Amino acid sequence: METLAILVAAGRGERMGASRPKAFLALGGKPILLWAAEAFASAPSVDALVAVVPAAELEDARELLGPLSKLRAVTRGGSRRQDSVLEGLKQAPDGFDGIVLVHDAARPLVEVGTIEAVVHAARETGAALPMLALADTVKRVRAGRVVETLDRTELAGAQTPQGFRFALLVRAYEAAFRDRVTLTDEGVALERLGHPVAAVAGTARNRKITTTEDLSWAEDLLLRERGRVAP
Ligand code: CTP
Ligand code: MG
């Protein structure tokens, strides 16, 4: 096995405010988690998939993802995102020395091109992630007052999948857990070690579904693409 993808779907989806965790909500008639899993299943360089889900969803997730031939395991997550990623890392085969991809299942519309670009860059440099330029002017605000305006040309939003040589991510994770650092993504664990992280082009389509507005945006996008409504 050369490339293992870990889909983290074990969050509670509190900002979505739905009765089920958001990875299990329907988008265009199928669960968000399945959209993400199918994207990775159809990426030529991905060999195996691991899904990390809430304990209460294990059975449903196994049934949902079972038909995917690249599925390696469905396992339960932890309380923080990084705890869920750690559970996913434990599902790698013994002696694995390939590339591991970590993806938010909450980004269901990730393109195969992005996955392939991340794998390619991670093979070259050891660590890579997709970045998307920011549209808004970005300012630092403290106690309700603008402190400064940041140079937007140097800023970008980090997306997933984030790809790493497996041993490198494990080392970075071990250091972060030892130092009790809260990780907002995998890249920050590498940055702490001073390891270079390559940036590849992110896309607007790979937006994270966080609120009901994001879900409506994704529904509208799919409807437009299916030609049911005029663009
Ligand atoms: N995630 C996870 N385990 C956690 C927390 C988050 O696997 N303990 C996953 C989510 O399922 C999601 C991704 O990490 O696919 C990004 O997290 P986020 O968008 O914050 O999702 P939730 O934590 O589910 O949402 P919220 O923060 O609104 O509760
Ligand atoms: Mg969260």
Image (cartoon, helix red, strand yellow):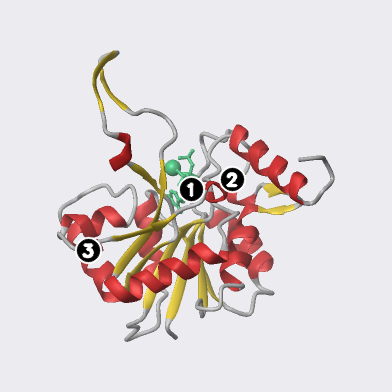
Question: Mark 1 to mark 2: distance in Å?
Answer: 8 Å
Q: Position of residue 178 (x, y in %)?
A: 16, 58
Compare residues 45 and 183 and report the one nearer the observer: 45
Asked whether mark 1 lies closer than 8 Å to ligand 1, one says: yes
Q: Which residue is mark 1?
A: 11
Q: Which residue is mark 2?
A: 22
Question: Mark 3 to mark 1: distance in Å?
Answer: 22 Å
Q: Secondary structure at mark 2?
A: helix
Labels 2 and 3 touching (C-beta < 8 A): no
Q: Secondary structure at mark 3?
A: helix
Labels 1 and 2 touching (C-beta < 8 A): yes
Q: Position of residue 200 (x, y in %)?
A: 39, 59
Q: Quadrant of the C terminus?
A: top right
Q: Quadrant of the N terminus?
A: bottom left
Q: Which residue is mark 3?
A: 172
Asked whether mark 2 lies closer than 8 Å to ligand 1, one says: yes
Mark 1 crowdedness (10 Å alpha carbons): few <14, some 14-19, many ≥20: many
Q: Position of residue 165 (x, y in %)?
A: 31, 74
